[in-house]
Image (tube, grey):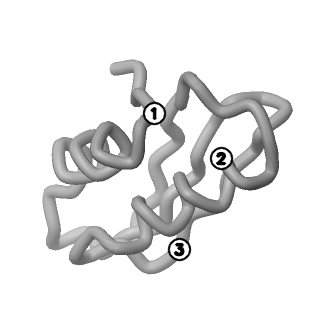
Amino acid sequence: MAKLVLEVEGMSCEHCEKRVREAIESVEGVQQAVISLEVGTAEVTYDEGKEVKDNIAEAVDEAGYEVVI
């Protein structure tokens, strides 16, 4: 397993936090996403054999938020 920390913009409440977590965890290869509303980050645990960063950014965008790359 590998870990990736991403900055996520646009979150303002616990509902936002939940939507971002669900969006990230829906990406194939992602095992877990821990979202920090206070810091504006997502710590993602994923299968090292998968290239997930672009897919995560797309899923977060579709949920109405933005990953800062």
Q: Dot 3 corresponds to which residue?
A: 32
Q: Earlier in the sequence, mark 3 or mark 2?
A: 2
Q: Earlier in the sequence, mark 2 or mark 1?
A: 2
Q: Is residue 25 left or right of residue 38?
A: left
The reply to whether dot 3 and dot 2 touch (C-beta < 8 Å) is no
Q: Give the answer, above or below, for where 56 lies relative to 66.
A: below
Compare residues 35 and 4 and report the one nearer the observer.
Answer: 35
Assign the N terminus to one quadrant of the image: bottom left
Tell me the amino acid under the disc marked 3.
Answer: Gln
Place of residue 64 in the rendered image (x, y in percent of width and height, measured from the top left): 41, 37
Place of residue 48 in the rendered image (x, y in percent of width and height, measured from the top left): 26, 69
Q: CA distance from mark 1 to mark 3?
A: 18 Å
Q: Residues within 10 Å of mark 3 (few under 14, many from 20)?
A: some
Q: Is residue 47 left or right of residue 44?
A: left
Please identify, in this view, whether the residue under mark 1 or under mark 3 is nearer the observer.
Answer: 1
Please identify, in this view, whether the residue under mark 3 or under mark 2 is nearer the observer.
Answer: 2
Q: Dot 1 corresponds to which residue?
A: 65
Place of residue 38 in the rendered image (x, y in percent of width and height, measured from the top left): 85, 32
Tell me the amino acid under the disc marked 2.
Answer: Cys
Q: Secondary structure at mark 3?
A: strand
Q: Dot 2 corresponds to which residue?
A: 16
